[in-house]
């Protein structure tokens, strides 16, 4: 394998290859500020080469029986397990999250491989005998061809695996473009993939930025596009891929509300919400970012949150005991702090101020400490803006109905959580909130790999989601055959 | 009900309403040339009113239990059965096809209602207990909201029913725009719908043309778009609806090849292919339009086709014994005849010439008689152009492999059929042709209502199709809930 | 149709026929004591004739496409709707329950027909392409042949419909034996079936008792047996049908506990439990018969129950305002009252005594008024005996854990319900109770027709249940085909 | 691990344990006649201990999340792969089949583990929101408890795996009883299982004979029984387990017909049928045992078979080049040869005589060489008797219809195969033969692990089969919950 810690390479047609790109972008460890290496901004020509390799491999790969295709996934699972620690450390180093968070992420990636190992049962078509006398009909799921996966920086290992193992198991070939901010995790993963014996061209890795994305969206041989990123880019990708006639699924951003009722276990709720808001430094599309305390819940809940925010140990994710790492880039840190400034100037009370964090030994790290705002006036556009940092706003309303109205009034529809002990309230909330993922006494309602990773309104564009059965459906096209064998039947009737 | 044979009206918010449009377009009986009435080119304002009505009805309709929603469909089925003859005659009058063809179409519409009656079982979500100790996960299918259905002229009754009954049964509200060339069938159908007691605004009918389509594609309250039409417009609709962030499925055009092997029953094959090519005057997206005779099949097959083409009785679809009606408009007739001219000038042999048809008693009818071309040089762009008229080209190749290569070389991927007695050839063909719907010894491989109406490459844009389970999936969004009830469990473990 | 109110006949091979039986049993209206007619105790020879008719029809009926088979069910649904009142009155007259209860029952029967109308989508098999290179595999669901349905007295219309419509839609032929106590409802239903044009022998009705049952269980042409009745007979039927090598599903009896927590809405709980315990005079396999009040719930809950029991209007089910009818026979009344006697002598407190009921105008009716026992010592075997009458025992425990332990300690496992407002308790209960049907704040947890009618432990024998998908699976056998077409593939690889 | 080659032990409650049985039965290598060890005839007391261990483990194992349960299977799969050769050799040594055949068997076992690894997706229940306003319904699949698996001698590794991995993944605990003739394979497998860390009592192994079987069938804690063996014992097990109220599935014997049409590739057909008939020395429930040659196929087909039978190298399965091993016991050899004697005396022509085989170096081996009979008169009861040895009868008929009639006239319904090139004939055969597993141009129509291992008529008793989805259904019981949370909804409507 290439030395992943210096120069990031592409993996095309079964080989590590240098991009033709002139532009290379530096990659930094966000905690230490160390330079980790550089990543090529692959050109549309690089992308073309990768897509060609994938297109060339597609007809042969499609003919490999599904049970043999999943055998590669069983192997990959073993390798991911064996390299669990190395992969986890890599994520922490390039992405900043704590080692425990990275481990959780790798575990999620593995679980998607496990579910995709079950593709032989999930990919089956259905059929009917005698739709008319002597005529049968059968629906067969066949691969769509070359699939592009475009992944974001915040889960360098997990998010590619919402798609990659399913696409492969279904007989497609894949070109994956990871985020240029965190290219090393996939360098490692492809180092493992390189050893499992997949036919040449079945999986390909192209590093880069917007040019590479556009090239994937426009290339006529790419038949399907899976994207996760901000809502603005998700809309763009959805629109551009569709304009090119492709099937496409785009997961966007979020501003996730959590609602706390007075009948909840408020200590537990506070702890869970703090973990949701500050875990992964708030850089999760399922991070809680707006807590709505109902009635008397406000005060005690805020106290727990404040305590949790203040006491959360922020630092280098590889160090023992650290509970939160840095945000991804200096630009990101600046943007988050500016949004906090704006919130304060718009009238929010600053309960815990995490700006201007100075972490001993890591002066170059892009740290933002846990930040808690209260009573942010709703007209403030910060109330609707995805901050993507460890910032939690707490507002207060009088009834669950007001809380639900607030949940449904925003642009996004990724997640909403409720804390309560009451079954009636839970059912009402689940029924009425217009989001894809609902949590009841849960802070991060991440669907298991055998469920779709859902999303609604401004948080998802398309119909079929990543993970599980949805992924199988997205990565196959249905062929329907109507068959009659006349000789026999003309004799019989 | 309004007098449908004069002035076409919209049906909005439970009432027949006049469009605000100034433009009205005349509608003609294509066989008699009689004026049937006129249809409004509804404005975006008309569309807005209908979408608003649908949006207003959506929250309430969603709360009606699915078993009550399907009760409306059981009623509608009864009414469609009771009005079977009237609906069939209406189709023939405005669309031109024979009464038997119209009856077949209405039957297909009814079958879709029947399958949608089974929505309570098909809409169920799935769930897992203990994804982790004490935590459950559940996926619930909920309606998407307001759905737009945009239908073509060639199946005025059937195609709206690929979508409408499923959308309703899933708890959505609908705005349907039929083709402005055949508005009367839906006038009749909505006359029936008007009597079944659906809540106000649940279904809405807007007549019109491009302005109405664009208004539906752009309206922020429309959450899903289902379209059937030409590939060019399908691409446009797919792209524009996606640009507006909607889920969208678009069925396009076709140029359907049928392959005849020497081991087929050639008489049977000829009869079936003739019915496929000339039935509905060739105005079907599943019409055979290019026959590829392999080896010795060419001569005897062509003979049967020639005989069938010459002897097919063309005339007014309501008259007994008539086997083929007119094409839809004078423009269509002119276009078809020009394409035949071009084919001939490009080198095709004219086996049967159906141009300049004169049908006694129907001098104003836009008739084209069955036309058979042979040996059309493949470079001719007519070989790849959807003619959408009763024109069949017959070419000859030496092997099934060449035939499959031809099938896969075109732009479209709607249907391909094979005639053979040999199981090996059938399997090979089914496996290798890149089309959505495959027929084996079948001329019109139309999927039953409990199968997706598939389509591939240039014939379909999207992932989920119309009819059956696909329709249920398209017309629902998945909400995933992760639930923990901590009190109990903290006690137990 | 035969005059159903005098002499009950069999319906065999498309004709109403007199049984050869010498024995006939009188049928009485349990409220008025009027003689309604008599029912033949069909001999094994009668059964043989019916099974032969069914066996003869089976090969042809299997070849009728499923979409045509369900067309008969759509017709039957219309007829059941049109005869809704007549059927409901018939049930009340022969079975005793109130008209509203009868109407509810007919509605449930219709819902099963509706779900079975969706069989074309539910009966589909599944398939895989290329299980090895060039080899395909397909699973096809085919009918099992002749199916026997043996039904109890308490739901003369509904319970046959848990099976009958599915068996038919799946292509089986059926011999149905209703309870000899309530033969008239099926006389009416078969009067309707007689008009829908089913081929001769597809459905057959045989009236009788044990001899008829045994003949069905032993007959080699009967391939599947569906039974609902007491657990003792269910065990017998399960064992004997299995000894004859048949597939078999048997729903047995119950002693259904309901648990009331102090955090429930106790008034609502009391009303719902009273309806569950006294509705249908307690003659439901989902009737609540043992209320376990936890902690402080006992007193207020008992008050509501007492009030409800005392005020429930008992009488002739056809009369307006009547809330409860008689039990089915004098023997049943005697048995119930004896059990109440025994409970009292075993130490139970008699809160409301419904014995020795005298209903004005109906001196011959077999009425038992609502009866409430408290603190029945658990060692009393009445605590574990299915009373099948309007008798509710209320006991008191201190914790939900004790309540669950009680639920799981009995022989039966049909239903258990919980009343609570707390989500944790609901989840714990649902998770831990070992019963087939669970209700949360529901008194009669009857699954909808698109769910299995479940049951566990001593309440169900078999694996696949009645209703919905389970019924489809039970009434089909799976044929798996592995196919290779070698000519093609030896050429390709 | 215990020394498996001497004294077979039970594995109960996580420990290798000696049976209390006095009786021990010797186990021989059928090729060498060497004594391999002895196996205890465990008593009902031994069985009781194992069932108790399983029952004790059940409540805890059920609470382990399904994704953790399948992690044990992923581990087991790795171990089976790593011990592939050792397991294969063990099978050959105790069972006699060739090493290649043993390898094929272990591969099939592994494939079942792989499919069971996908249980998290396959075990999901289904659910409906708003079955009535504000009421939800959910079906949850829960384990059934203690499951017994009783396996035959002919596939010591594979057949236990039709059930075991699914039972475990579904949360059940298991007691497995292998055949007393081939106990060593499961000794090895349990040696591996012992290392994967399953909780104590989750899987248990009891060796023995009829007493152990009866004890399993009667034990009240055993909730489900899966059996594979002869039809006579299958009927017995089905009946006795049902009499004890358990769910039960029993796979029985077979007499599998293959039909050869003149249009088949007769050389290929002959080779495939010979492999089917003589592979595993004919000791497969899917072995071809009766070839029906139609029309002109008889002569050339018989020639190929004769050649194949005569040239098949019979010997010690561990030796390179050997194509067929011995039958399992001297009694089996004697029985087979007696049946051949009888066939000859009943009028069959002995085409190839495999009796009295003498294999150099293996004088004590229980070898029967490939034997081919022709024109066995159908009245001979040998024509309907399962021989379970390398004996193929070839008969001749004139039409496919006669052949199908023959297929359907026997007692068994396990498999039927057709050799043809014609699609019409294939469809007709697949449609009409009354067997569970159909092969088209395939000699051993063994369903993949993601399909049910089907069977019909005298070859299967029950409804749900082993393998795949069926196994998941068999090893779970459905709990249906109906839930209402009234506070919320009484407020809303």
Image (spheres, coloured by chain):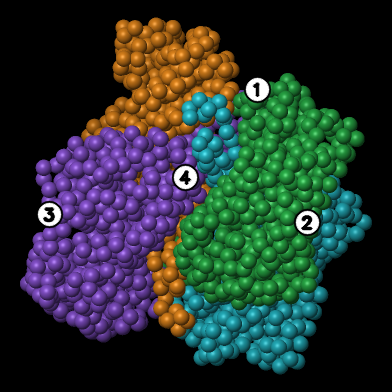
Chain colours: A green, B cyan, C orange, D purple
Q: From mark 2 to mark 1, how far is it between C-alphas?
A: 40 Å
C219 relative to C303, above or below: below
Question: Are the residues flagged by discs 2 and 3 from a single subunit?
Answer: no
What label does residue D68 carry, if any?
A: 4
Q: Label 2: which residue?
A: A233
Q: CA distance from mark 1 to mark 3?
A: 68 Å
> Is there one chain holding both mark 2 and mark 1?
yes
Instruction: Determine which of the numbered discs, if any, sits on residue D26 in the image.
Output: 3
Q: Position of residue D148 (x, y in %)?
A: 29, 44
Q: Nearer the viewer, mark 1 or mark 4?
A: 4
Residue B437 sits above or below residue B289 on the image: above
Pointer 3 chain: D
Where the N terminus of chain C falls, by quadrant? top left
CA–CA distance in space, label 2 to label 3: 72 Å
Binning the other alpha carbons within 10 Å of mark 1 as few (below 14), some (14 to 19) or many (20 upward) gives some
Q: Residues within 10 Å of mark 4 (few under 14, many from 20)?
A: some
């Amino acid at each position: 394998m290439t030395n992943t810690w210096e120069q990031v390479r592409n993996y095309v047609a079964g080989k590590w290859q240098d991009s033709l790109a002139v532009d290379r972008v530096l990659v930094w460890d966000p905690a230490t500020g160390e330079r980790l290496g550089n990543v090529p901004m692959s050109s549309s020509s690089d992308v073309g080469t990768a897509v060609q390799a994938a297109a060339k491999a597609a007809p042969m790969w499609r003919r490999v029986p599904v049970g043999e295709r999943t055998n590669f996934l069983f192997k990959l699972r073993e390798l991911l397990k064996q390299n669990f620690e190395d992969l986890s450390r890599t994520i922490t180093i390039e992405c900043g999250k704590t080692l425990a968070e990275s481990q959780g992420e790798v575990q999620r990636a593995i679980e998607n491989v496990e579910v995709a190992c079950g593709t032989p049962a999930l990919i089956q078509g259905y059929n009917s005998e005698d739709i008319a006398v002597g005529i049968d009909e059968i629906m067969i799921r066949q691969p769509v061809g070359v699939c592009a996966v475009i992944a974001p920086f915040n889960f360098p290992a997990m998010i590619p695996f919402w798609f990659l193992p399913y696409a492969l198991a279904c007989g497609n070939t894949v070109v994956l473009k990871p985020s240029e901010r965190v290219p090393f995790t996939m360098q490692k993963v492809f180092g493992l993939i390189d050893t499992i014996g997949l036919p040449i061209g079945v999986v390909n890795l192209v590093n880069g930025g917007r040019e590479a994305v556009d090239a994937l969206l426009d290339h006529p041989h790419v038949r399907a596009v899976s994207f996760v990123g901000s809502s603005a880019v998700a809309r763009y990708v959805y629109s551009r891929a569709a304009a090119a006639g492709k099937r496409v699924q785009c997961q966007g951003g979020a501003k996730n509300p959590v609602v706390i009722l007075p009948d909840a276990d408020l200590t537990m709720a506070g702890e869970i919400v703090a973990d949701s808001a500050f875990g992964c430094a708030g850089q999760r599309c399922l991070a809680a970012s707006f807590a709505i305390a109902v009635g008397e819940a406000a005060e005690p809940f805020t106290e727990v949150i404040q305590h949790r925010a203040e006491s959360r140990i922020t630092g280098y994710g590889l160090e023992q005991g650290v509970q939160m790492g840095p945000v991804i880039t200096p630009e990101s840190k600046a943007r988050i702090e500016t949004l906090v400034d704006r919130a304060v100037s718009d009238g929010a009370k600053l309960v815990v101020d995490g700006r201007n964090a100075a972490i001993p030994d890591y002066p170059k790290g892009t740290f933002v400490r846990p930040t808690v705002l209260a009573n942010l006036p709703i007209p403030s556009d910060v109330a609707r803006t995805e901050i993507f940092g460890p910032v939690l706003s707490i507002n207060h309303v009088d009834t669950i109905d007001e809380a639900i109205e607030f949940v449904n009034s925003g642009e996004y529809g990724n997640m909403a959580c409720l804390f309560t002990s009451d079954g009636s309230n839970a059912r009402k909330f689940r029924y009425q909130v217009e989001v894809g993922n609902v949590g009841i006494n849960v802070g991060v309602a991440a669907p298991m790999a055998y469920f779709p990773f859902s999303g609604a309104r401004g948080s998802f564009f398309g119909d079929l989601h990543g993970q599980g059965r949805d992924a199988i459906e997205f990565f196959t096209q249905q062929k329907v055959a109507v068959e009659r064998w006349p000789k026999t039947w003309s004799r019989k009737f």
